[in-house]
Amino acid sequence: MSSGWLAKMKAGLKIERVRNNSFWAVVFILFSVVPILFAINQLFRLRLFQVTLIDNAYLYYILMFYLPVVFLIFPATQGSPQNRVPWYDAVLFLTAAITCGYFGLHGLNIISFGWEYAAPLTASLLSILLWILIIEAVRRASDLGLMLTCIIFSFYPLVAHLMPGFLKGQSFDFLTTARLHAMGANSIVGLPLFVLCNLLIGFILFGILLQYTGGGTFFYNLASALLGRSRGGAAKIGILGSAFFGMLSGSTVSNVVAIGSMTIPAMKRTGFSAHYAAAIESCASAGGPMMPPVMGAAAFVMASFLNVPYIEVAIAAAIPAFLYFLGLFIQVDGYAAKTGLKGLPKNELPPLWRTLKEGWFYLGVILVMCYFLLSLTVEAWAPFYAGAALLVLSIFKKQTRLTWISLFNIISDLTKTLAQLVAILGAAGLLIGGLSVTGVALSFSRELVAAVGQNSLLILVAGALTSFVLGLGMPTTACYIFLAVVMVPALVSLNINPMGAHLFVFYWGALSDITPPTALCVAAASGIAGSNFMQTGWTAMRLGFIKYIVPFFFVYNAALLTYGALREILVATSFAVIGVFFLSSALEGYLWGVGRLKLVSRFFLIAGGILTAFPEWISSLVGLLILVLTTVVSYVPVWAKRKALKVRNE
């Protein structure tokens, strides 16, 4: 490799630990590019060099490339070298590559001879090593809380026979437990990693390509052209821009960074307080993982759990996502009206036609993505086709054309994201493995149902609280996977729609993005805005309140998940929209046509809004009556005041 190419490559690598060393820079690029080629070969059945891998071997080889990278780019501690790779990380890198490579080479033997129960000594010892490597990798790539959770549940098979009541399960010795984790079909190389390697890789690549070809800027400009001049326009730009970008990237924190870096300063400049601006962007970006067509990693795992096409999950999530963003939009508009905030000046906003003319191909790739998601029998191909279309179309504009440096930036971001996900999903596999092999997951659900009887509300409240608490301590995807194994069977056993049950725990687990003390979106946004973290977090919780209650709505009426006749879907959605409108108005303290609301009126509108949105005829009609009466009572003084003013002027 010539020095010129090496200089460009190193300049494009964002990770300082490998950028400063030519050897590790080359290794990093190799361990970044080769697994993508592996994935393309496997997913499209290309049989390059006559290579076709069985599923478990393919997973081990992907693990062989991305697990070692965790030790390459994530330092062991805050005091570890940040600008170079120390010797112990080099040893861990090599150990992880050799261990996973060994299992990949023996993938067929693992299946054919049942190595998870009886394996050669080398395989057994390497199983212990892989178990340790995954735990250390998730500590580095995520946090101590998830690592401790993985340790507890992965070691559970050793002591399951000693546990009381429904926590008691089948036990295994240490070596068998290690083999089950490393070579069983329900642990490290189980469903979470399978979904990553067979579905998520392409979507993550597409999201990063979208960002580097200027997608974030286009969606910001489009939102600006559509809403910039309305009251509170800067905040509405943030909501719409984040919704646009999030529906294709499926990310949260990167959404805050990509869109918030433009919207938060604009909001502050037009009169929004720093904490309110950061809270708006936090809530808007937190909607990314639930915004079709491309949602977060958990949605793809959900499709595999349910054994349905991914597009079915995306369609089911559409109405709840719309209700969430509608509630956020109404609160922002109310705040702007209440405080007298105006829109952005016309000379600061891009013309709509020029924006569409310059970035029409971004909308085109959305159509390409949706077409292939709906028409292809293999959904994993859709992001690759859409990504290829994006790359080809971006060539024709200098501003969107990729350079060598931006290409290496893409590789750097993609590899870091995938390495982190490999660590998290591998650890989530340990959670599933520990619960499934002991049989405790099923007994937990059974005992939970027995404890609440047939009271679905109690089990939903228990599920919400469990999801919420776990979501504060672990990443959304890992939290969802754990709850899908432990909690969802209990919900389904009470005749709750399976899709609704999965989305319920997903929504409540994802609340950690905007709920202190974790609140990753809030942390990123408050950093940009320079606001107080806790003040921003509490504001984000109020603005995102719809996210807390919408799951209860769609669980009780699957029409909000587009299940049922068209008439049922339209009626349920209409009531939900009315309820969300008044609920959001009450939360902000401002109602269109009425103005500022008194505390008593807000209380009744909140109650009426929840009852109206709740998809059950009697409660909806009672709620609607409360809304009408409260609105009339609130409007009478306003009407009288306006009439008196009119008489005085005459």
Image: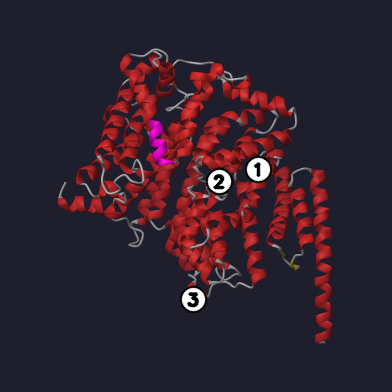
Looking at the picture, which amino acid does disc 3 mark? Asn
What's under tag 2, amino acid-wise?
Ser
Which residue sits at x=43%, y=23%? 181
Q: Distance between the residues labelled 3 and 2?
A: 39 Å
What is the basis of the colouring in this image? secondary structure
Please name the amino acid that badge 1 sits on. Pro
- Residue 258 in picture, x, y percent from top left: 44, 57
Looking at the rendering, the stretch of residues picked out in magenta corresponds to 134-142
Q: In which quarter of the image is residue 508?
A: top right
Residue at the spot 73% in from the left edge and 44% down from the top edge? 567
Label 3 or label 2, whichever comes before in sequence order: 3
Q: Which residue is more in the foreground, 52 or 361? A: 52
Name the residue carrying label 1.
Answer: 551
Residue 347, disc: 3
From this view, report whether residue 303 is shown above or below residue 359.
above
Residue 357 magenta? no
Taking depth in this image into account, of 448 and 248 the one nearest to the observer is 448
Question: Residue 13, percent across and down?
Answer: 29, 50
